[in-house]
Amino acid sequence: MLNTAIVGLGNVAKWHHRAIDRTDGVTLTAVVDVDESVAQRRATAWDVTPYTDIETLLATEPVDWAHVCTPLASHADLAQQCLEAGAHVLLEKPMTATRQEYESLVDRADQLDRRVTVVHNQVNYPPFVRARRLVESGRYGELHGVSVRWLENNDPREPGRGEWVLDLPGGEFGEGIVHPIYVGLRMAGHPANEESVDVQRINTTGDSTVEYDGIGVSYTTADNVVCTIQHHSNVPGCRQVEYFLDEGRIVADIPTQSVSVHPEGYDGYATVDNPLLNAAWWSVRNATTAVRSAITIQFKHLLADLRDEEFTVHDTHTPVIQQEADAIRGTGDEPTSRAEADWTNRIFTRINGDPTT
């Protein structure tokens, strides 16, 4: 049994608790938060022991696995303390604020023969999983490109995750940029090298307190797949990944929880009639798929209600935590590879102007 503690009890801690509760061989024994009232409230609700500092927890009871869900600036120090106490560590994203912190942390974990990894949960949305399987099936030929479009209708100056995000160059937006970065890496593959990565930032807020509210990242993999990642704030929301293959396009869309396929195409001399008819035909098929997806989700909600269970398509943490528990025990693959964690941190710190590099 993996005795587990959650360190930091903000909103994301609830997803960790839910996932731990659904993972065999893992039990939550303690929670830590600097706000005593928050720690006590969560501990009472979850029937565990509350603490207000990590030192007391680690000195008081054995912890096999620590989930660090605190603000970014504290990640490296808290993770280091947990490793030194003999615990494996799972960090919420972003993993660390700098390259120096990242390298120091993974090096120490290796020296101590402990696992340290980061939550890259949104690759587990069902449309992303289904689309990736279609790509890997080879049905539509070789992959040439991946486009990640991550648009949010929030303002980076409004701290939804807490005031601490305002210390980041991109504010609230700067904390969330990790999601489209790791989604792109998982879907397209990793950059061939550092030189193949291009990063651009824009600021449309007109506010000098925010360094950017939009990013563009592009790179080429060793297999010549081109990946582009766009993430913008203050625009109508969209979360999509589009694959470009020999014989069509595949689009995975999070808001509609659907996957659409577009095998139609045209050359430079095509008349409008045939491409138009093909596009209309596939639009009908894709709309039918989206409706079927919506009906399936509603049916699962209804079934869960009848069983007095909780269901949500947004529970993308449970697969990560179940996989990582298996990896700790040596019975399964890790949910986030070291290479993916490394490249995500490289791109994230490059966007933010890492002072240690």
Image: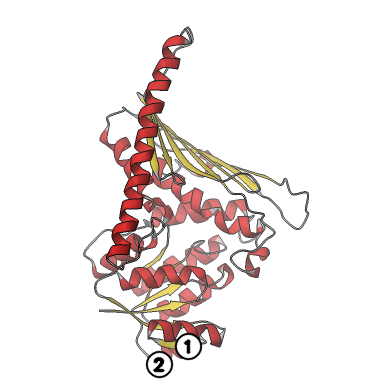
Crowdedness near tag 2: few (<14), some (14–19) or many (≥20) residues, C-alpha within 10 Å: few
Whether 97 is drawn above or below 296: the answer is below
Q: Which residue is nearer to you in this view: 68 or 274?
A: 274
Compared across the picture, whether 258 is left or right of 38 comes to left
Where's residue 222, x and y in %?
40, 37
Secondary element type, mark 2: helix
Q: Which mark identifies residue 51?
A: 1
Name the residue located 51 percent from the left edge and 56 percent from the top edge.
345
Please say if the residues under marks 2 and 1 sit with CB atoms less than 8 Å apart: yes
Q: What is the residue that sits farthest to the left in this orientation?
A: 331
Disc 2 residue type (three-letter): Thr
Tell me the quadrant of the picture where the N terminus can be found: bottom left
Q: Where on the picture, by quarter, is residue 131?
A: top left
Secondary element type, mark 1: strand
The scheme the figure's colours follow is: secondary structure
Q: Where on the picture, by quarter, is residue 59?
A: bottom left
Residue that numbered label 2 is attached to? 60
- Say which label, 2 or 1, has the lower sequence index: 1
Where's residue 317, x and y in %?
39, 62
Disc 1 residue type (three-letter): Tyr
Whether 260 is drawn above or below 232: the answer is above
Residue 260 in view = yes
Residue 323 in view = no
Whether 340 is drawn above or below 134: the answer is below
Name the residue located 43 percent from the left edge and 15 percent from the top edge.
275
